[in-house]
Amino acid sequence: MRADPAPAIAAALPRIGVDIVPLSRIPALLDPESGPALHRMVTDEELAQSSPDPDGEPDPAAVAGRIAAKEAVFKLFGSTGQPLPWPGIQILRGTGGRPFVRLTGRAARLARSAGLGPVDVSISHDGGYAVAVAAAVAHAPATPSEPPAEPNSERKPMSSVTTSTGIEKVRDWILGRHADRTELAMDVNIIESRLVDSLSFVELVYTIEDASGTEIDFDAIDIEDFQSLATIQKAFFS
């Protein structure tokens, strides 16, 4: 009697992540006046490999491709409700120019918790978009999925700012990204409503840092702190 193959199939399942990034969103990130948002997302090594010349400026299409690939890889982790560990997912140039994935820090821990084997990624460009597909085989994880990071209890304000002024700066930044909106209530979930997506989340963090004078540790982020203006005010301006 042949053994039931179901356990073997269940123990090793393929996972696929897909993401698309408009090239139009990249020039603002490359603008020096945008602050450190880009460097929170893409490492210096990745930026160097995104330039056609060693001393040249990064190619927006190459940067968009790497950002799309990072998001596609993150989807393999199944880490719903956690912020994307941008620097820990590196998309580097391998043999023949083919991209390969290097995982470090929290990204590597999330991959292990998900039981992922080696991750492969493919990037393509068409018109004004960069598209990336990531794939890996997931085996039964040896440990439970990583719980959300504990709130950072060691946030240290770098300057004094009033609550109303600070949260209004954050509100203005969000509204400035959405010409169709003129108001934003304190209790609106800005994540679920897609007012802030995973790409603009890093910019949101930088905006909060600038408005509050508080440095935010990406490895200690609690996503619940960023759900609405009310939670942002409580976490960073109280």
Image (spheres, grey):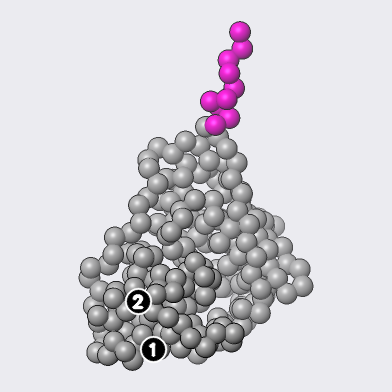
Let me know if residue 3 is in the magenta part. Answer: yes
Question: Is residue 54 visible in this depiction of the protein?
Answer: yes
- From the top left corner, tell me how far across and down residue 238 is, in percent: 24, 80
Q: Nearer the viewer, residue 218 or 230?
A: 230
In space, the residues marked 2 and 1 are separated at their CA atoms by 11 Å
Q: Residue 168: which disc?
A: 1
Question: Is residue 35 visible in this depiction of the protein?
Answer: no
Q: Residue 138: which disc?
A: none
Q: As shown in the figure, which amino acid type bears the numbered disc 2? A: Ala
Instruction: Identify the image quadrant of residue 217.
Output: bottom left
- From the top left corner, tell me how far across and down residue 109 is, in percent: 40, 51
Q: Say which residue appears at 52% left-offset and 57% top-offset.
A: 74
**Is residue 88 left or right of 123 when viewed as pictured?**
left
Seen in the picture, residue 178 relative to 45 is either above or below; the reply is below
Let me know if residue 229 is in the magenta part. Answer: no
Q: Say which residue appears at 55% left-offset and 34% top-offset.
A: 12
Seen in the picture, residue 101 relative to 192 is either above or below; the reply is above
Q: As shown in the figure, which amino acid type bears the numbered disc 1? A: Glu
Instruction: Return the residue found at the far right.
Output: 127
Instruction: Identify the image quadrant of residue 157.
Output: bottom left
Q: Would you call the spot at circle 1 few (<14 residues within 10 Å), some (14-19), or many (20 or more)?
A: some
Seen in the picture, residue 48 relative to 11 is either above or below; the reply is below
Indicate which disc, 2 or 1, sits on the residue closer to the N terminus.
1
Instruction: Return the residue found at the far top.
Output: 1
Residue under label 2: 230
- From the top left corner, tell me how far across and down residue 31 is, in percent: 55, 86
Report helix, strand or loop for mark 1.
Answer: helix
Extent of the magenta region: 1-10
**Is residue 155 left or right of 144 when viewed as pictured?**
left
**Is residue 169 left or right of 183 when viewed as pictured?**
left
